[in-house]
Every structure is written in C-alpha cells, then in structure tokens.
Amino acid sequence: MHFRFSLKMFRNHLLTSVLGFALLAGSASLAGAVTEDVQDEPVSVPEALADVPTTLTGTYLSARLAQEEDDLELAAHFYAQALEKDPENPLLLERNFALTLAVGNHDQAFALADKLAVMSNQKAADQNQATTETEPTDEDEDDSDATAFLDGRIAPMVHLALGVKALKGRNYSSASIQFQSGMNVIRDNPVPLIGGAPTRNSLNDPRLLSASAQYGPFALIAQTVLDAWSLIGQDRTKLDEALKLLKADEESEVNQFFFSLHAGLVAAYAKDYTKAAALLQQSLDADPNSLATATELVNTLLKAGNEDRAKKVLQDFKASAADSEEKQWLQDTFSAMKPIASSVRTPQDGAAEFFSTLGNALTEEGAVEGGALYLQFADYLRPKNDYTAFSLGRLFEHIDKSDAALAHYDTIQPQSAVYKKAQRRAAFVLAREDRSDEAIERLKTLLEGNYSDLETVSVLSRVYQSEKRFQDAVNILTRGIDSIKVKRDIHWSLYFLRGSAYDQLKDWPNTEKDMKAALKLFPNQPTVLNYLGYSWVDRGLHLDKAIEMIRQAVALRPFDGFFVDSLGWAHYRLKQYDTAVNFMERAVELRPEDPTITDHLGDAYWRVGRKNEAVFQWQRVKTMQPDDKLLESVNDKIENGLKD
C-alpha cells in the first residue's frame, strides 16, 4: 500500500521548517569554484554541451546543466567524469553519491558513501589535531566553516544510505547507529537550505525541497522513522522505545501524519493492535483522505476483533473527499469484514512505505532529485511494489522520460488499486509522444463499455480533443454524463469538457448550455467562470455579467495569466483601453510565452497610442510559434495597424 498525504499540508510544513532551519543555520556558501548557488538562465542540454571541452570545469558545468534539466542520469554521468579528473574533491564525491543513488545505482552509491565516511572521519581527526597545535587564524576559521557546511550536507546522506544498506541486510543494530548519527548531525550541525534571507521565489524552488530531503527537515523525519523500524527489527519487545522515538515534538500535520502512521504500523508489526489502532486513527485524522491509512486502520481493527469500529471507519472514508475509485476499492476489499495480509510485514516494508510516500510527494512538487532519491530507496528495500512503480512512473513523466514511465506503469498488476490510474497516466504519456491511437485503444480497453468509469471517460475525451476529434469527445462525454444517476459538484468537469468540445465544433448554444450546467453544479468554479465570461466578452454578450464573472475568477486565482488576460480583454471590449493595458501587462508577466496574451497586449497598446510598443509585441508573437490564423492576423497588423 502507499500512504499518500495532502500536498498542501506538505507545503505548509516545508515553509515553516525551512524558515526555522534558515534562521538557525544562517547564510553560508561553498568555497572555491564549485558552488551550488549558480542560477543560470534555462538552457537545453544539447545546446549547452555542444562545445564543452572535456576538462574538469567543462564536465562539471555539463553536469550542472543536465541537473538543471532534471536529467539525473546524464548529470550522474558528467559528475562521474569530473570526479575522474579530481577524485578527492568532496563536493564532486557528494554529487556523485547523491545522483548515483537517485538513478538507482545502489552498489556504486554505497561504495562512495564508504569513501565519504572515511574522508569525513579523517577531516575530523585532522581538525582536532590542528586545533590542539595552534590557534586558528581568520582564514582558518573561514575554511573550517566551509568544511562544516560541506560535512553537514554530506554526512546526513551518508548515514542515511549506509543505514538503509544495513536495514536491507537485516543488520538492525548497525542501521540504528547510522540513523541516530544522521539525526545528530542534522540537529547539531544544521546547514542552510537557502542562501541569505528567504524570498518568495527561493521558498518555491523545488531544489529547496530536495535539499530538505537530503539534509534538512524531511531528512530528520526520515532518519527518525527509519531508526524506529530498526529498533523494532532488533526485537519486538522494543515497542515502547520505538514509539517514544516516534512521538512528535511539534504538532505539525506532517509530523502527526508520519509519526502517528509509522507508530501505528510499528505497533501493528509488534501485534499490539490496540495501540496500533489508536495511532493509525491519529494519522487518519491528520489526512482523512489517505486510502492506505484507512486500509491499515480497518485491517488492524478487524485483527483486534473490533468490527463495529471498522465499519465506522469504512463509513467515514466513504464520505471523505478521497478518490471515488479508492473508496470503492476499500469497500470491496473489506466487504466480508475479514482481515487481509498487511502491506507492511517487515521493517524493510515499513521503511519502503515511508520512502515511497514522501518520494511521491516530493516528485509531485517538482523536487526531482529528492523524489528520485527516496523512491529508489523504496524500490531497493522492497522491489516490484505497485505503488512505488506508479510513483516512479510519475517521476519519469516529470523529467520527460516517456519510455521509462511506460515501463513502470506496465509492471502494475490489474488487481492493484492503482492499476486504472497507471493505465490512464500511460495513455497521457502515449498521447504526448504522438502515439494517440495506442492511447485511445488502451483507454477503450480499460473502459470495456462501462461509461460510468468517469475518470477514464474524461481522459479519453481529452485525448480525442488533442487529436481534434471533437465529435468523438462529445460522444464519449455524453455517454459518461448519461450514466450518472445523481449529479454532484464533482461532475462539473465533464460538462466543461463537453462544452469546450462543442465550442471547437462551433456549436455555441450547446457550449453555453454545458458551461451553465457546470456552474450550476459548482457555482464558484474559476475555470468555468473564466471560460464562459471570456466567451461572452468575445461575442459581445452580457458584458457586465461577463466581466463580473471574470473578476471573480481572477480573485480566486490571481496568479493565473490566462484569467488576468480575460479580464483585460473584457475591459478592451468595453473600450476601457487604459485599464485593459494594466491587466494585459500583468498577464504577459505571468505568461510571457503565450502568443495570444502577447497579441492582446499589442492590441491594447495600439488603442492607447503606444504604436511602436504594439508592433514590438506583435513581432514577439511571431517568435512564439502561433497557429496559422494568429500568424496571419499579426502580420496584417504589423503591416497595416489596427482598423478603427
């Protein structure tokens, strides 16, 4: 099973804990030419590597560029080349270690971890000897700080890797020593995850999340949870000691989720089902939509003979905001009210569950290196697990490795709770790879004529629309909508999708009808408010009502460039050109790559007399690969301007 938790909860915890670490550790930077603070403009890997010589600097920069592109395999390759030229460079060793782990080369990574551990011990010994021999100069102090910073980054990952290796080999005492050492380093020698004062942009940087997973707040949670599993692996009588370790020091939702969850799993492993049920309930309270937590709680209650409470948990989960398929899976699984085999039967399984859960969350937040690192640990500890395979598939989707993503999705068994999700994700991957026929066939097979499978209906309609098969999209959505017995707010998207397909077929009456139906089900849905409001403005209909709807959409999503552009376009159609310029400039800031928004700004500039700037914006549109109709329009405007 895979324990999912709220990404909003995850994000809030990250911001709180990272700020604490930043204040505690202060600002620092790496000495020398090799630094982690370089922030170059995005460049594609092929462009960047075209003329790079095979020097230390060249291979290092190649590795950095590959890493910026989230191509972890290529980055690992170049870091290895750089290490060949400077085999004792600690930062290159650390980068090789982290990336070989992230791409799943465990044996090589463990060998590097051993080397780093030896180097770290030697540095500590040398530093102690130097301290006794002479008073440090200012320069010595700077070097010492840099070394401490480097060790603080490397040591937690080294201890984590060596602990995982020991845990895999059932050397639980050795694993516990490594995890405790890792916790001590993080607590006693914290290092900044961000340079200088935190800013809004730096806190939203996925690299910050990866750093947190390697040597920050999430790494501390990881070492703690894994130490508990190592303790219970040594002897099940150590349950109280393990549970004490998993008692959250702070009342954050993330700590509550992970520590309560794994305390419950540890107690269930020790067969203390009364304690396990209480702890798992705490975790489910922190995230009521977690299928895996609900599954383990129901299973534990049934093992404890508490059928009435198990029924209550099933009933509550059915009323939760969880995925409808997950709700059905849980009801079907426990329809006979009998316990099933637990997904966590060994300490290795417990550790793998932790890595899989947090690795998946990191991936969904764009923290590719941290997500890959944790998911590879999960796969190492428990190979061929459906939930880990699904998360690895999502990871490879994020970094545009379609073949690898498909390979992972196709390992998932039909009886798995994530099988249908995997097939849908595979269809999206195939469609993006211009293999839409394969995607459509896969989705049709998944449907098997059951149009009440609304998730698959929705995905199939999107693939049809991407292929401009709008009538097919309308047909499949109509069958899906007709299968619904009681329409609820969650069904708004089906009407929205069908309405947008009707729009492409130039069937405005049905477009408007479906958009209104979507709003009736979900009155404040910003996407529908924006779409219908923009459509009315574009047709010169209901302008006052339309602009109010778009204002509401922008209020709900103020950083959505398309919504801001719609509001600007509404003012433009009302001939309020100065106001239109203000909104359209903001929209272009939010979506500088969009040709339609840029074209709108050019039109607004022209109307307020800023004609040179208007032509400049229209020229920019031509560089953005606009469709033929828009290209023809801007060429005409560049040559003739806008007619009154």
Image (tube, grey):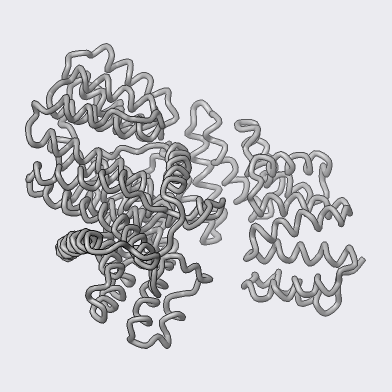
Rendered-image quadrant of the N terminus: top left
User: Which picture quadrant has residue 112?
Assistant: bottom left
Q: Nearer the viewer, residue 395 or 34?
A: 34
Rendered-image quadrant of the C terminus: bottom right
Q: Position of residue 310 (x, y in %)?
A: 27, 17
Is 253 left, or right, of 121 in this rendering? right
Q: Position of residue 75 (x, y in %)?
A: 33, 71
User: Which picture quadrant has residue 131?
Assistant: bottom left
User: Which picture quadrant has residue 614?
Assistant: bottom right
| Residue situated furthest top in the rendering | 308
Q: Position of residue 191 (x, y in %)?
A: 37, 53
Q: Residue at (22%, 56%) from the top-left corner? A: 158
Q: Nearer the viewer, residue 485 or 577?
A: 577
Q: Where is residue 571 in the image (x, y as percent from the top left)?
A: 83, 51
Is 523 left, or right, of 311 in this rendering? right
Instruction: Report if residue 104 is visible in the image.
Output: no
